[in-house]
Amino acid sequence: MSVSPNEHIECKVNSLTRVRCSISAAAQWDAMDPPDDEDDVPFSQLVAKQQDPVLPDHNFDLNTPTGSPEFAASYNKQQRRHGKMFNDPVHNLFRLDPLSIDIIDSAQFQRLRDLKQLGMTYYIFPGASHNRFEHSLGVAHLAFEVADKIWNSQRAELDMDRTDIKVVELAGLCHDLGHGPFSHVFDRTLLQSKGVYGWSHEEMSGEILQTIIDDGHIKDDALDDIDMKRVQQLIVGSCPNHQPAGDGAPLNDKRFLFDIVANGRNSIDVDKFDYLARDSHYCNVRVSCDLNRLQRLTKVLDNEICFKWSEYENIFELFHARATMHRRVYTHRKAKAIELMLVDALIAADPVLKMTERIHDPREFIKMDDTLLKQIENYSMLHPHFEDGDDHAPVVASQKIITRFCCLILSTCPDTHNTD
């Protein structure tokens, strides 16, 4: 491709103009905070040295070696200043704030990567490989969007502040921290088969969040005790055993906040918005509900979140979509058969793995995830002194059950397209 002399000269002029602007900007920043030895500072660092006069703790130390822990800490502060972006297949690009990122980086939250959203349904719908990690990110994003929309339009009459948005986002982020292995199979089938009733993953989520704070993942001034209590209240808001906040409780005058993440009043909440959109996407099941409209056309009336009257058909489609997913995916007969065999295997191995004894200690509970199945299958490799004795007889019995349902899975693979 040929370039005329005039175009070539114009390109040179534009390049020189950009260089002069960069030099001028560097000179201005240099005048604000001159380096100790100007001759030793590269020009590229002068241009990039945009010091923050408002939050000086977020500035880079240019004299710190790039490979040192001090530079990593300085770089981490700069990266955390505005949170982090996530590219999600359901909600596209969104950002979560720095406090949420501190929780996400904890070992307790990273455990959600090993908890599949739909449990054993993955063996019937091969696309359903998503886990509770990305679901929690999506719920946090939607919770922020709804709370921020209400704050922008009604903050004066509702006496809202930005702290309300923060606790709602954190509740959406942490609402599934207490889920056990294999989705709801653990709490709804396994524990009840062992005679354990009254245990809820919502309450365990609040306890695990407390361990994250105790481990120092969150700065003391980032989430005080009152805000922590509010987050825990929002998480267990729909729990059957949870009593509404009494007089003087932190959220007693803002009951509408309970309708955002876990709506025990009518079950229309962002948790449902995300899992219906996400599960239908990964299972390739079409639903016709416009969740984005429901999210945006909201208003608080009489301390409750309400929807515009014109959305009555959309709300009908929301519950129709939920019924469709339950009929075609959540209660798929082959998936339920595999789940029942899985429960038999876990019950058989419980005397050795002691799963039901760990449900009351959050630090022991987080050691359990979907890898339990592989731990049982490979028990002899993890325990070199494993023998077919009385002490390990429960594991052997569990392994035989797992072998049988693996054969069942293989026999259903050619028929996975049949979702009747």
Image: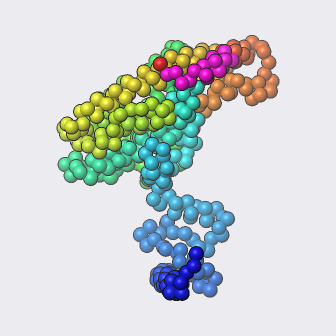
Which percent across, then down, holds residue 282?
50, 35
Q: Residue at x 60, y 30 (%)?
A: 370
Task: Please tell me whether residue 408 belongs to the stretch shown in magenta.
Answer: yes
Q: How is the image coloured?
A: rainbow
User: Would you identify the image quadrant in which residue 359 lies?
Assistant: top right
Pick the residue in front: 98 or 277: 277
> Magenta region's main secondary structure?
helix
In the picture, measured across the screen, residue 400 lies left or right of residue 317, that is right
Q: How many marks?
A: 0
Residue 167, visible in the rendered structure: no
* Picture quarter with the N terminus: bottom right
Tell me: 300 left or right of 103. left
Relative to 2, say whether 263 is above or below.
above
Q: 95 left or right of 417?
A: left
| Rendered location of residue 76, percent (x, y) | 55, 60
Q: Is residue 52 visible?
A: yes
Percent coordinates x, y for residue 189 in the rendering: 51, 18
Region in magenta: 403-419
Q: Which residue does the image show at 67% across and 65% down from the upper left? A: 67
The stretch drawn in magenta includes residue 242: no
Residue at 63% across, 30% down = 371
Query: x%, y% of residue 120?
Result: 56, 25
Q: Is residue 276 above or below residue 400?
A: below
Residue, x 49% and y 74% (percent of image)?
Answer: 50
Question: Image quadrant of residue 74?
Answer: bottom right
Considering only vertical position in the picture, is 291 above or below 51?
A: above
